[in-house]
Amino acid sequence: MNKKLLALAVCGITAASMLTACNKDESTHTTSGDGSTSSSQEATEAVKPAENVEIMNYTAPEKGDTIVEINFKDYGTVKLRLFPEYAEMACENFTKLVESGYYNGLTFHRIIQDFMIQGGDPLGDGTGGESTWGGKFDGGVNPALAHVTGALAYANSGSTSTNGSQFYIVTGDQNIDDETFSEFEQYGYTFTENQKKIYKEKGGTPFLDGNYTVFGQVIDGLDVIFKIQYVATDSFDKPILEDVVMESVKLSTYNGEEIKWSLSDYDYEDPLDAVPVNYTAPEDGDEIAVIKFKDYGTVKFRLFPEYAPKAVENFVSLAKEGYYDGVSFHRIISNFMIQGGDPDGTGAGGESAWGGSFDGGKYYNLIHAAGAVAYANSGSTATNGSQFYIVTGEVYDDAGFADLALSGYNFRDTVKEIYSTQGGVPYLDGRYTVFGQVIDGLDVVFEIQNVETNAEDKPVTDVIMESVTIEEYDGSDLKWYISDYSGEDAEDTESTEETSEESAETTENTEIEENTENTEEITEAETVAE
């Protein structure tokens, strides 16, 4: 089972403190009336179904029934069937808010790939919203409605009695099997045979059943929901490129139109099938970064402002003011990465162009391939500063990916292809802000990674950036891969067998740790940290 699902099983979804709850830390945070927060390491106990009731999510509305239409700006329209026969108060609240125009123009403030998209807060930060009656209400749960893909439910802050205006639509895990349920059951979750059957067929988030009020189901526009779930987000899962806006939410009538319950019913191209954008070429005149290393040579890398705008802005601003000139690379690990950008040269210093730290977010299609450039952090992308690293990494074979899978890491075929030919550090994906990719000088990076270091991975002889400048790309040849320099395949640089054995030992402990000196550390599991 994916580690993220386990973390979310513990976190659930809280409505009162969306920006602090479930921040990948496997703890639940709730906000009290005075704004203070508390946390619990225990999962909310799932309600055990009293009997093997039939799951009704995929029953069609009848002609004349009320349905909801949400028009998402730049994405399309989603239609949802409501279930007043199973969730009367929940449906009444939602329809009255819709009729009043409450949701028009509001954003979806929290989006988690393979889990759900969430909106309905007029404040847009997850801390606001109320029911049509003011305050909160109890929508209850009905075992006939499950958290299958496309389900509509209310967010809450600990129980269904804290429902308000915030709601979410499930995308969820699309590969649930008997093994998945066995692992859930080890955490105390219980499922009926009907639940298991429907989740195996449709996917979803079964660990949320019994804790949240499900009251609707997508009948058209599921492809829209799945497209939205892939937007770039910050450390609080808030979209960073542009807002996901509900231009209008209205009630309409079902007139017997075709119902599309499943993704297979749509002409849908899964973004996960796309090749990672790391190796997309800059255009003539685009800004690129140029690092001149003393005694080694020059490294150039392409920037990705279209996917990591704030991250690129920070780096460009620091480079243009000369911040990095003369700064050393203070931490180097062969077959992993080289790290620098701290003016103190210790790993404990550095700050962003705005002072302090900033949140650069993450984008699912920028990965930690060899040559990727990313910010170090101290636990989340919200703690980015000036320190950055350039990936060298390892080449992975099937055994290496199998070892990663045992630790909950799963990768699409297009990503595996890159890591199995060019190498990288796949288990860092999704936790650090990747914002660049080396286009020339990767051989310099690979040479630097082999310098002599002490016990703290600090070079015995300083590796210094004489200058870091921002220049315009002039159309010169791109050398993405180490094989472009030596004629050797990246696979020849390191034994894949050794890689897979090391991965089995290290990937269980890949959480970022901050030591007592607040240095940008990488644990023995080789994670990049501040």
Image: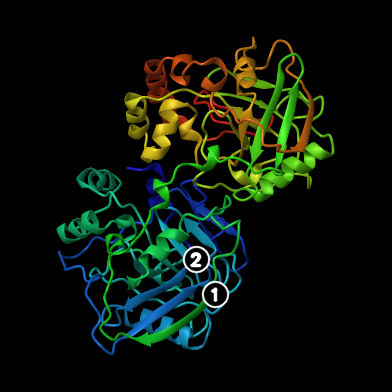
Q: Which quadrant holds residue 264?
A: bottom left
C-alpha gap between disc 2 and disc 1: 9 Å
Judge from the rendering whether residue 260 lies leftward or rightward of residue 353; answer left or right. Answer: left
Residue beneath disc 2: 15
Secondary structure under tag 2 reads loop
Q: In front here: 11 or 70? A: 70
Q: Tell me if residue 471 can be seen.
A: yes
Judge from the rendering whether residue 406 lies leftward or rightward of residue 289; answer left or right. Answer: left
Q: Check disc 1: other Cα within 10 Å, few if <14, some if 14-19, many if 20+.
A: many
Q: Which quadrant holds residue 472?
A: top right
Ranked by sequence position, the earlier of labels 2 and 1 is 2
Q: In front here: 485 or 2? A: 485
Residue beneath disc 1: 129
Secondary structure under tag 1 reads loop
Amino acid at circle 1: Gly
Rendered location of residue 68, percent (x, y): 39, 80
Rendered location of residue 261, percent (x, y): 27, 67
Amino acid at circle 2: Ala
The residue depicted at 62 percent of the width and 44 percent of the height is 304
The residue depicted at 61 percent of the width and 71 percent of the height is 123
